Image (spheres, rainbow, N blue to C red):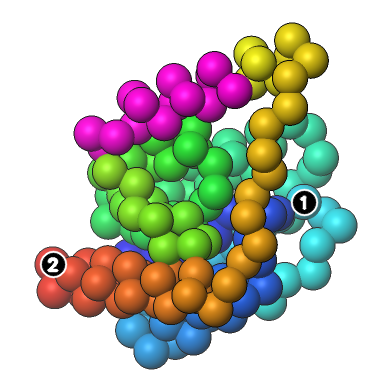
Amino acid sequence: MKLIIDADACPRGALEVCRRLGRAFGVPVWTVAGFNHRIESDRHIVVGDAPEEADIAVVNATRAGDVVVTQDWGLAALVLGRKAEAVSPDGRVYRPEAMAFLLEERALKSRFRRGGGRTKGPRRRTPADDRRLEAALTRMLRAGKART
């Protein structure tokens, strides 16, 4: 089991929660990010700036039982397909039964933006987000450790 972070867009607070919990549970923390990021982790995978390059590296590193932290719904769907778990940096646990809805919503919003529409960006991060992430990761890591 390892904790893999899609670190290109992961907030610093979320990265710190992941590093702290990785140490506490004895789970290696891997980060994947473009070459213009300097991130401390047990293993850092540097990718170029090609579209989806970080996502492909995360998927290739993911094995059954791993936990992936990502904001990307498409990437979450891919790692769930690999029998891993996925959670957003604000503590939202991705469930396989919700992925079709999330991916359809993403496609609709993308089409709307291509047509000149504007959608809201992410809301400002709060300390409650870190607490939700910590609670979700603790449950996932505890359950994963119990399975091994």
Where, by quadrant of the figure, is residue 49 drawn? top right
Rendering coords of residue 87 (x, y %) = 41, 56
Task: Indicate the amino acid at tag 2.
Answer: Arg
Which residue occupies 74% across, 47% down?
Answer: 47
- In the rendered image, the residue lying farthest to the top is 115
* Numbered marks: total: 2
Neighbor class of circle 2 (other Cα within 10 Å; few <14, some 14-19, many 20+) is few
- In the rendered image, the residue lying farthest to the left is 147
Along the viewing direction, whichever of 54 and 129 lies nearer the viewer: 129
Image quadrant occupied by the C terminus: bottom left
Task: Indicate the amino acid at tag 1.
Answer: Gly
Where, by quadrant of the figure, is residue 125 drawn? bottom right
> Which residue in the protein does label 1 denote?
34
Question: Which element type, helix, strand or loop, lies under badge 1?
Answer: strand
Q: Left of 116 or right of it: where is 96?
A: left
Neighbor class of circle 1 (other Cα within 10 Å; few <14, some 14-19, many 20+) is some
Magenta segment includes 14: no
Labels 1 and 2: the sequence-earlier one: 1
- In the rendered image, the residue lying farthest to the bottom is 24
> Which residue in the protein does label 2 denote?
147
Q: Left of 129 or right of it: where is 114?
A: right
Q: In this picture, which residue range is highlighted in magenta?
A: 96-109
